[in-house]
Image (cartoon, rainbow, N blue to C red):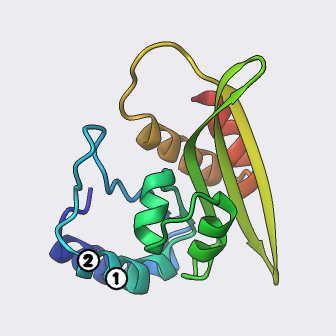
Amino acid sequence: MLATLEHAEILVHYLKKYHTTINHIVFDPVLKATLNYPLFDSTEYILYIKQNLLPLVEVIIPNFEEAKILTAQKTENVDELGKELLKTGVKAVIITGIKKTFKNGIFFCDHCFIKQNSQVIKKIIKKKAIKGEFHGTGCAFSSALLCFLIKGFSLEHSFKKAKNWL
């Protein structure tokens, strides 16, 4: 968790230094605690992340609220948020935790936006909500996605496998 601008600057320094030797960089921004209080120290921090860290990242995995913070948008349109985050230089954006009610129950939908050439490919995976209260699912999902990427799966396939594992 990068709670301060100084932590972000240190990470960016080392990512720039070793960027060519790292195969995959997945970033889960962790900007808001489950208890609904911010976990970062300033708007300068958000700007620094967007301008300096995200261009070095392959995949960013914010939840819906974090995507709104990073884009400084109040929109409820997940497509707008995903496309706006792709403009930062990341190759893919996975916006997680979008809760929707369907006839057959409550589901959590994750939206994946992958930049390929000049096109954006969008994939959605929905999974039925499980009763209970859970913490750390975003971190677990991010870690699983990175593991599948390291094992050589494509980004799209890693997204599906990580979501199914979770």
Q: Quadrant of residue 35?
A: top left
Image side of residue 93 versus residue 4, left or right: right
Image side of residue 63 versus residue 43, left or right: right
The residue labelled by disc 2 is: 43
Residue 118 lies, in percent from the top left, at 82, 84
Give amino acid for label 2.
Thr
Depth check: give the residue in front, 55 or 122: 122
The residue labelled by disc 1 is: 47
Look at the picture and state if 31 lies above or below 52. Answer: above
Q: Residue at x 34, y 53 (%)?
A: 30
Q: Quadrant of residue 76?
A: bottom right
Look at the picture and state if 46 lies above or below 63. Answer: below
Element type at marker 2? helix
Give amino acid for label 1.
Leu
Q: Residues within 10 Å of mark 1 (few under 14, many from 20)?
A: some
Depth check: give the residue in front, 137 or 148: 137
Residue 74 lies, in percent from the top left, at 48, 66
Are circles 2 and 1 on residues that touch, CB within 8 Å? yes
Image side of residue 88 versus residue 127, left or right: left
Q: Residue at x 48, y 56 (%)?
A: 62
Element type at marker 1? helix
Q: Residue at x 68, y 51 (%)?
A: 111
How far separated are the C-alphas under marks 2 and 1? 6 Å
Q: Residue at x 70, y 37 (%)?
A: 161
